[in-house]
Image (cartoon, helix red, strand yellow):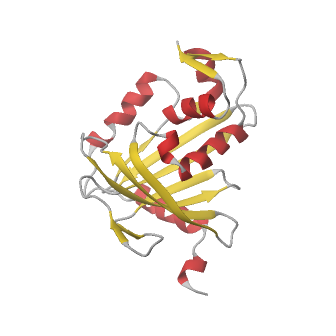
């Protein structure tokens, strides 16, 4: 068995968890977002519709492959390639994008090793310093900020989906500056922008903030 075929979703989960518990790294976990409760409290939607867990997972898988469509407020260029099915039934692919910095106005290249598990309804985006493109050329991540790993997941019940999200920066020492953008998101109390986009683009529903 070669190294590539030995990789499973658990491999990615272990790497994420080890980064999360490393004392030098900087971590932030958003409170679970009750999608329908936030919709009812902070939005007008026409026609009214209850979003299901299946819908939120559909959004997550589409966003993972196509970030330019679902997070255009973060990325300006993006491409994904190399999608394969691993031996545990999960999927893996690679992603390169130009993204705004978390605490700077600079923009740089972000490289991510992406693992998708339908069984766990969880996706890991593992930051990489270098990556080989589909054409064989080598890409390098921009050094303007630390590498980071992100977890996107769906929880809750069929009719009460929860959007779950956490991030860990591979820093030399905990740096609270990287937590401030996410604390602002919590204070705003809105849905993540990618859910708003999915509701309007994919579900064809009218949405406005109250």
The percent coordinates of residue 98 (x first, y second) are 36, 50
Quadrant location of the N terminus in the rendered image:
bottom right
At x 67%, y 35%, the residue is 161
Q: Nearer the viewer, residue 98 or 121?
A: 98
Above-or-below relation of 160 to 89 = above
Q: Which of the 4 image quarters holds residue 196?
A: top right
* Residue at x-position 66% and y-position 28%: 204
Vertical placement of residue 194 versus 37, above or below: below
Q: Nearer the viewer, residue 54 or 142?
A: 142
Quick one: 161 or 54, which is closer to the camera?
Answer: 54
- Which quadrant holds residue 158? top right
* Percent coordinates x, y for residue 36 in the rendering: 65, 25
201 shown above or below 88: above
In the drawing, does residue 54 fall left or right of residue 123? right
Horizontal arrangement in the rendering, residue 74 relative to residue 41 (left or right): left
Q: Quadrant of residue 141?
A: bottom left
């Amino acid at each position: 068995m070669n190294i590539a075929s030995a990789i499973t979703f658990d491999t990615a989960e272990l790497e994420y968890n080890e980064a999360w518990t490393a004392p030098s790294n900087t971590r932030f976990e958003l409170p679970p977002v009750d999608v329908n409760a936030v919709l009812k409290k902070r939005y007008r939607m026409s026609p009214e519709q209850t979003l299901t867990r299946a819908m939120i997972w559909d959004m997550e898988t589409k966003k993972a492959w196509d970030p330019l469509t679902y997070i255009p407020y973060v990325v300006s260029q993006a491409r994904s390639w190399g999608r394969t099915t691993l031996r545990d039934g999960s999927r893996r692919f690679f992603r390169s994008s130009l993204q705004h910095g978390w605490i700077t106005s600079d923009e740089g290249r972000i490289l991510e090793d992406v693992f998708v598990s339908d069984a766990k309804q969880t996706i890991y985006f593992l930051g990489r310093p270098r990556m080989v493109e589909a054409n064989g050329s080598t890409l390098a991540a921009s050094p303007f900020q630390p590498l980071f790993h992100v977890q996107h997941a769906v929880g809750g019940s069929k009719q009460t989906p929860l959007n779950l999200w956490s991030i860990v920066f591979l820093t030399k020492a905990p740096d609270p500056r990287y937590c401030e953008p996410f604390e602002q998101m919590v204070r705003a109390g809105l849905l993540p922008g990618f859910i708003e986009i999915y509701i309007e683009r994919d579900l064809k529903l009218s949405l406005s903030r109250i």
